[in-house]
Every structure is written in C-alpha cells, then in structure tokens.
Image (tube, helix red, strand yellow):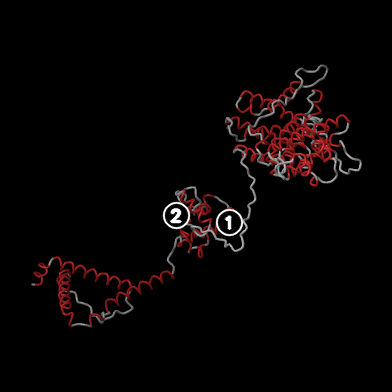
Amino acid sequence: MMEAFRKAILQDGPPETFALKTVQEVIKPQKQTKLAQDENQLLENMLRTLLQELVSSAVQSGEEIMLYGKSIDAEDEMHGVIPQLLDVVLYLCEKEHVEGGMIFQLLEDLTEMSTMRNCEDIFRYIESKQDILGKQELFARGKLVMLRTCNQLLRRLSKANDVVFCGRILMFLAHFFPLSERSAVNIKGVFNTSNETKYEKDPPEGISVDFNFYKTFWSLQEHFCNPASLSNAPIKWQRFTASLMVVLNTFDAQPLSEEEGAENNLEEEATTFNIKYLTSSKLMGLELKDPSFRRHILLQCLILFDYLKAPGKNDKDLSESMKEEIKSCEDRVKKLLEVTPPKGKDFLHSIEHILDREKNWVWWKRDGCQPFEKQPIEKKTVHDGAKKRRPRWRLGNKELSQLWKWADQNPNAMTNPQRVRTPAITDYWKPLAEDMDESAGIEAEYHHKNNRVYCWKGLRFSARQDLEGFSKFTEHGIEGVVPLELLPLEVRSKFQGKPSDRSKRARKEEMKSASHQVEESQIATPASEIEGEGNRADMEASVAVMDTDVSAAMGNNSQGGTPTPEPDEHQKQSPDIDVGQEAGQVEEADAEVETGMVDGETDPEAESDHVG
C-alpha cells in the first residue's frame, strides 16, 4: 500500500491527475469520492508511517528534508518527495475526499521530527499554503492542531537569536486565526514573570560608578515585569515611586542635545535590535547618553501607568493619592519623552495614539471578546413566475414599526428627563440677557448676538413660544426679542412696549365696528315679528305687560320718581359722538333694563303700591 503512494508521489504533474485514483486503488473505499471514518483512519496511519520513513531516509542521506528526492530538472525550490506528499494530501483534504484535519496532523509530525534548521523550510511551505489551509472547511478541523504546532515551535526557538523566525510564526497566527479568536488573546491578563532582569548586586572594584543609582535604576524592571503587584500593595508602590523619581531627576539633570540624538541613527539600530539591554555597571554612563535607551525606559513607565488606569473585570482599588501620583508621574514622563531627541514630539504623539487605541482592546477583552466579524448576507433568488410579496408593516415601514414596538416596551421613554427637549424661551435667552447687563462687564465681541446660529435658533423658538417678543425684532433687533423679565431695570425701559399710532388707530377702528354692531341689533326689527300678527296676539300682549313692568321698574329706580324718557327708535346718534361714550351708554342701559326686570319679577306688590 505504501509502495503505491511512494510511486504516486514520484510522478510528474499536478496532484489532481493521480491523487484520487491512487487512494481508490489502495483503500478501495465504499464510496468512490469520500472515505468513511475507519477508512480515513487507515489512510492517516499509512501516510504518517510513510512520512516518517521519508524523513529518516533524508536524515541518513544528509540532505535537507524539504529537498530530499528533488530531481535535477525541477524548477521549484521545494519540489522534493515530502512536499509532493504534502501537496497530495492537501488536495484530497481540500476536495473533501478525506478528513480535513489529516494535513495538519502530518505537518505537526513533520515539525517534531525535524531540526530547527529544517523547521524553517517547513514553515516556509506552510506560509505558501496559507490561503488553502485557512479555508473554513479545513480551518474548523485543524485550527487547534496548527496552534499547537506553532506554540511548540515558539518554545523550541531562542527568543534572543531567532527573533525573526518567532515574528514570522506570530504573524502567521495573526493572519490564520480570526481577529476575535479567544485562543490568541491573553484574557486573564497574565504577565510573564519569568522574564527576569539580572544585574549586579555588589559594587565592582576599581571602577568609580554611582552604584546606588545603578541598583535603583535596574530595580524598576522588577515592577515593570509584574505591574499588577503595585495596585494592591502600598509599600511596593511607594518604593517604586521613590526609585522612579531618582531616575527621572537624573534624566532631567543630564539632558540630551540634538547633536547626541543625531549621532544615534535609530533606523540603523533597528536592524540590530536586541530585546534586552546589557546590565553591566560599566556601561551605565554610556547607556544614559543613548536616546533609544531612555525612550525604552520611559515607554515602560507609560505602559505601566496605562495598565493601572485601565478598567478591568476586577476593578483596581486605587486611592485618590495614588491616582494623583500616577497623573503627575505620567505628565513628567511625557515631558521627558518630548525633549528626548531626535523628533521627540512626533515620537510622543505616536505613543499616545497607540495607547489610546489599546483602550479599545481592553474594553473588548473585558466584555468577553465578542465576535465582530459579520458574514455576508446571501441574496435569495426569486424564481421565475413567483411574485415577490412585499412585507406588511404595522406603521408603513420597518423603522416606524420598530420605534412603535420599542415605545411599547419602554412607556416612560417620552417622559424621560434625559431626553433632548426644546428649551424654554427664558432659559435660552438668559446668556444674551447677561450680555446686555452693563454691570457684568462683558465685552461686545464676546456677546451672543454675534453668533448667527444662536440668534437663528432663538428666533425660531420665539416664533413658537413668544410671538409678541418675536414681533419686536423688526424694531429693536435681536436684543428686543429677549423677554423683559430677564433684563435689568435700566435696560428694560429701552424695550418696554409703548402704544404706537398704528396700534391706537387699529384699536379705535375695532371699537367703532363693535358699537355699530350693537346699534344695528337694537334698531333693526326682525321680520318674524311683522309677519303673522294675528297668530301671535298672545305673544304681543305678554310683551306689552313686560314693557309696563320695565317702565315701572325704571320709574322706581330713577331719582325723584321721575321716569326716564325712552329714546326714539328712529333717532340715530351723530357719528361725532365719542365711541367710548356710546359704548358706556349702551352698557348702562342694558344694566338698567336687567335690573328692572329682576325687580319686577321678584317684588310685584311693592311695584303696585308705588304706582297707586
């Protein structure tokens, strides 16, 4: 069985030409295109055994694993026997002929059997097949195996000598796994406390070095290694702040010039970057003159302060004094970064931007790493002949229906005091009223009347709530619209409304029209009284009796018992009479008539005695 596969991988051409045919000849599956579970297990065991034999043969021959069995005419750098075997299995997994996790298991076995030099070639093959391995049907089956393989490689690599290879692995994991993958996030916030910085404990002989400063400087790394130990330990925090103040004072006392910053080319230094600085006491003076060295120490301080201020699942118990110390230390560190050449301000701006974005990740981890990738919406195809039925909404469209439903669930939404409401006209014009008060001493250029948007909004509010004040805009401008109760007494007199000639004339015309209406109602005889006199004889008799009672009552109420003469019905008053007098006479006559009617009805005996 293995010989059939060994011959198959030696063939030239793409795997799709012979891969499935070889599996059918060796396994003879029940289904022609897909293996059953036991058949997958049998094929996997056989391929793992074949891979182990090929690796053993490559080691014995002294060739590199990924180049073993390469033909002279092959143009591809990795066209050996083992890459050909991996291509065959990858094709079978992609087409779902075999179980999708088989290729990941072979890659894990291959890295475990290889040296670190060969593992770099193997990982180069993995990177070249990243798009196929990242497909959903393969990723779901082998993501844990791939994660385990990469973590084993990282443990075997040296963090000091294999920095580039470690970075390649981490970059691959970042692209291979989705951004919201929980396995790639340090959810618990565990610090790498094993990263210990070793430095000299005893002063060297024959070298004049401020050894106390040396020990104080490097002791800060113990706190940077585990910032969580400072949040609940006041003694440690005091020790850390005391040491930090000594270091910051030294940086202030020994500022770096632009010439010293220009001597250190940071771009060239990045090519030979080391993750840890040397801690020899002999190098302390040179390291203090290195701007890159200072920036690393100050950046560690900012990261520690950012952690202490950041919210977490277990809120840190920080006292008010500790918060103030963090704020003052942070400001001082930022000032030192700003004056550290070269381009200190640009460097500080970039660091602040990075730390600000880091807060979003902290909140995301605190909320449980909710997935934020959204799958594309599949558009459903409408079959020919089928009518597409439009959805019927309760209030006409989807948005209004959702708003109405939300209001049912929250009936107090409209009465919520936090809602944005139209302000009262007195509250809105209060700033402008304060500007108009001369005792406030506000300069004219800072008055609210210079703000066009403020004035425009105020006019709209006044047009809705205070129409009388809005009408003053044409005469007094924007200051006349302000309600009078908001203005001081000396300013209020300027804008108090005085009756103009136009308003007097309009009011006089209204009074004239009212008096003419009263005269017409008294003089005009209804047509209904003229028609049908014979049929309404009883009605006229009662009216005559009522007139008699009215005249008698008017006689009782007049002074000296002299009856008041009734005005002629056809007599009309001249238009020269003042309108106010006419209105007053009409009102008095009505009042007298009403009084007489009441007296005539309530006291008929007294009325008859007076007549007799």
Q: Residues within 10 Å of mark 2 (few under 14, many from 20)?
A: few
The residue beneath circle 2 is 485
Q: Quadrant of the N terminus?
A: top right
The residue beneath circle 1 is 451
Residue type, label 1: Asn
Question: Tag 2 or tag 1, which sits nearer the N-term?
Answer: 1
Image quadrant of residue 54? top right
Query: Picture coordinates of residue 161 (x, y %)?
Result: 81, 30
Q: On screen, 445 above or below 268?
A: below
Q: On screen, 595 above or below 433?
A: below
Residue type, label 2: Glu
Q: Is residue 229 left or right of residue 563?
A: right
Q: Nearer the viewer, mark 1 or mark 2?
A: 1
Q: Residue at x 24, y 70 (%)?
A: 590
Q: Relative to the observer, which residue lies in front, 66 or 422?
A: 66
Q: Relative to the observer, which residue lies in front, 467 or 228?
A: 228
Q: Relative to the observer, which residue lies in front, 551 or 104?
A: 104
Query: Picture coordinates of residue 348 (x, y %)?
Result: 72, 39
Label 2 sits on a secondary structure element that is: helix
Q: Residue at x 38, y 73 (%)?
A: 509
Query: Picture coordinates of residue 368 (x, y %)?
Result: 60, 38
Q: Is residue 337 left or right of residue 583?
A: right
In this view, the residue farthest toward the right is 72
Q: Residue at x 63, y 53 (%)?
A: 378
Label 1 sits on a secondary structure element that is: loop
Query: Picture coordinates of residue 271 (x, y %)?
Result: 83, 36
Q: CA distance from mark 1 to mark 2?
A: 23 Å
Q: Residue at x 61, y 28 (%)?
A: 231
Q: Is residue 282 left or right of residue 464?
A: right
Image quadrant of residue 450? bottom right
